[in-house]
Amino acid sequence: MAQNVLYRGTGRRKSSIARVCIISPGKGEISINGRSFRDYVCRDTLATIVKQPLVAVDAEKNYNIKVNVSGGGLTGQAGAIRLGISRALLNINSDYRPVLKSKGFLTRDARKVERQKPGQPGARKKFQFSKR
């Protein structure tokens, strides 16, 4: 029997942090926070975002993936998981780098919510101005 090897990657997006463990060899099972992949990620668009790196390198059924994700909402978590999976795949095989880099899966999306400033109702919105 083949020895199970563990590869790790960390992904961040908005305020979400995902710690990804890829177990090789595997059957393509993905679990997020101890729940099955389909139970946790309920929207199909988010499911495709999470699986994009695996589809790009044709490795959907080769590895088992365990994810621990916290913070933010489902969209931010899906983006963090995608980055974590991409980084872990690089640890497995560095030949995946050109494919993942060209599709933008190795780039950290640094956009965050802008903070609310004092004397304003929101980050950019101002209270209505009245001359008198």
Image: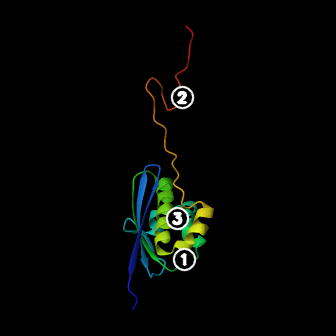
Location of residue 107 (image quadrant):
bottom right
Question: x and y percent of residue 124 in the render?
Answer: 53, 30
Question: x and y percent of residue 110 in the render?
Answer: 51, 48
Tag 2's secondary structure?
loop
Where does label 3 land, which residue?
50
Where does label 2 land, which residue?
125
Q: What residue is shown at x 46% (from left), y 68% (from top)?
A: 88
Which numbered disc, 3 or 2, marks the residue that appears first in the sequence? 3
Residue type pointed to by label 2? Lys
Tag 3's secondary structure?
helix
Tag 1's secondary structure?
loop
Q: What residue is shown at x 47% (from left), y 58% (from top)?
A: 80
Distance between the alpha carbons at the discs numbered 2 and 1:
46 Å
Quadrant in which the C terminus appears: top right
Tag 3–tag 1 contact (CB < 8 Å):
no
Q: Is residue 115 above or below residue 81?
A: above
Residue type pointed to by label 1? Ala
Question: Badge 1: how crowded within 10 Å, few (<14), some, or many (20+)?
Answer: few
Which numbered disc, 3 or 1, marks the residue that appears first in the sequence? 3
Quadrant in which the N terminus appears: bottom left
- The residue at the far bottom in this view is 1
Q: Nearer the viewer, residue 73 or 92?
A: 92
Question: x and y percent of residue 102 in the render?
Answer: 63, 63
- The residue at the far top in this view is 132
Q: Nearer the viewer, residue 50 or 104?
A: 104
Question: Badge 3: how crowded within 10 Å, few (<14), some, or many (20+)?
Answer: many
Q: Is residue 73 above or below residue 44?
A: above
Where does label 1 land, which residue?
59
Residue type pointed to by label 3? Val
Tag 2–tag 1 contact (CB < 8 Å):
no
Q: What residue is shown at x 55% (from left), y 20% (from top)?
A: 128
